[in-house]
Structure formats: C-alpha cells, structure tokens
Image: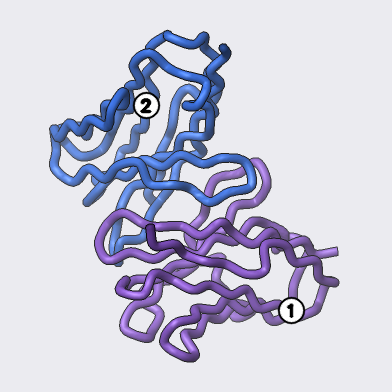
Chain colours: A blue, B purple
Amino acid sequence: TQLLEQSPQFLSIQEGENLTVYCNSSSVFSSLQWYRQEPGEGPVLLVTVVTGGEVKKLKRLTFQFGDARKDSSLHITAAQPGDTGLYLCGGGGSNYKLTFGKGTLLTVNP
Amino acid sequence: EPEVTQTPSHQVTQMGQEVILRCVPISNHLYFYWYRQILGQKVEFLVSFYNNEISEKSEIFDDQFSVERPDGSNFTLKIRSTKLEDSAMYFCASSPIPGYTFGSGTRLTVV
C-alpha cells in the first residue's frame, strides 16, 4: 500500500511570512499533484509534477518533486490570508489513481 | 472554465436505503473517478472508470457500490444498502491526463 505523509499537519503563520510544507513517501509515484481544499468544497488542482527534480512556480508558490519521485515540497513566499486552506498532495499511480496525504491545514493571519 | 458538477450537494438517507450520487464530468475527459472523505480524514480512492468500465477499485468499493455512465454524460455512484459508516463527502473527478478536476462533492449523511 502506498502511503503519503504530509507535514506539518497544522501551520499558523502571519501574513508576509514564508513557509514550506512537505509530502513524503517510501514509494515512487508517476506524478505528484498538489491541491488546495476549502471547507465543504472539492480539492482544486494547483500543479502536477511528473519528472524527478522538477520545479514549478505558480506566482508565489514553488513546487518541487524529489529526484527519486518519492517526495515533494510546496513553498509559499509572502503568505497572504487568501492562501488559507487545506493543502493536499496526491501521488499518481496506476490508471491515474491518486493516493492522498492527510493534508496540511494552513492558516495565514492578517 | 469547465466544471465537474455533482448533485445533490447534500443527501440524508436512512440506514439500509439505496442512494445514487450523480456527477457530470467534463465532456472531453476520458477518466472518471469517485473518492470519498470521511470528516477529518484523508481523501480516499474508491473507483476509476475508463472506456465504459471500471479500471481499478479499492477495497472500500465492495459489492454494495456500483458505478454507471448511463447516457455518455452522467456518471453515477450507487450505494445499495447504506451503512452509518458510509457517511462522508463523496467527490467525483475527471481527467484527460494526470491532474484532476474535482466536483464540489455530495455530503452523504446516513441516519
């Protein structure tokens, strides 16, 4: 069974701070996807990374896929209250099935 | 922007009753999925569907569950005899390639 561990589970920071959240596994994934989920809503795709060592930037968000395709990180620069939400990583497997971590609940305080 | 639409948004049912959760995936997507999220827990894979058949299912997806794509646009999840532990948010998703679009979910409450 493939498992994804996300850390930290909870993160509360002030507006303007930088942060990094992590997604780790002992398994290799064909792709790694990051989602953000608001309460009562479905996850919204932020990025997909497929190549080991790949780095993608989305405005203030930087995503990295580990060289061995077992881990990933999400770095947010100058966090804003609008970044508040549950950040999920999902590892891609057969038939594009995703295995999700439990998520990091980020709160950015004004 | 294309969306995955799920109905109803909230369903309350009595234990033992059958429920059908409905989804309209994005029209040119080829892969369809159902996931569920029990309150406070991780999003869990239930089933994937491709080329009008189940391509993979999890151990959660037992004989009480079934999926159909009855008319080429709708994608349904049926739970034949609901149990209390089936209470969860159920998400439909579709994708052409890695990178899903999820619907907003159906909150199923079994009482």
- Image coords of residue A77 (percent x, y): 34, 16
Hey, which quadrant is residue A55 in on the image? Answer: top left
Front-most of residues A107 and B83: A107
The relative height of residue B85 versus residue B13 in the rendered view (above or below) is above
Q: Which corner quadrant holds the N terminus of chain B?
A: bottom left
Which residue is at a point 86% across and 64% down the rendered structure image?
B111
Front-most of residues A97 and B94: B94
- Image coords of residue B11 (percent x, y): 75, 66
Amino acid type, residue under disc 1 in the picture: Ser
Query: Mark 2 sits on what residue?
Result: A22
Chain identifier of the residue bearing label 1 in the image: B
- Image coords of residue A51 (percent x, y): 14, 42
Query: Mark 1 sits on what residue?
Result: B81
Report whether mark 1 lies on the same chain as mark 2. Answer: no
Which residue is at a point 52% across and 12% down the rendered structure image?
A13
Q: Secondary structure at mark 1?
A: loop
Judge left or right: residue B3 versus residue A95: right
Q: Disc 1 to disc 2, how far (Cα)?
A: 39 Å
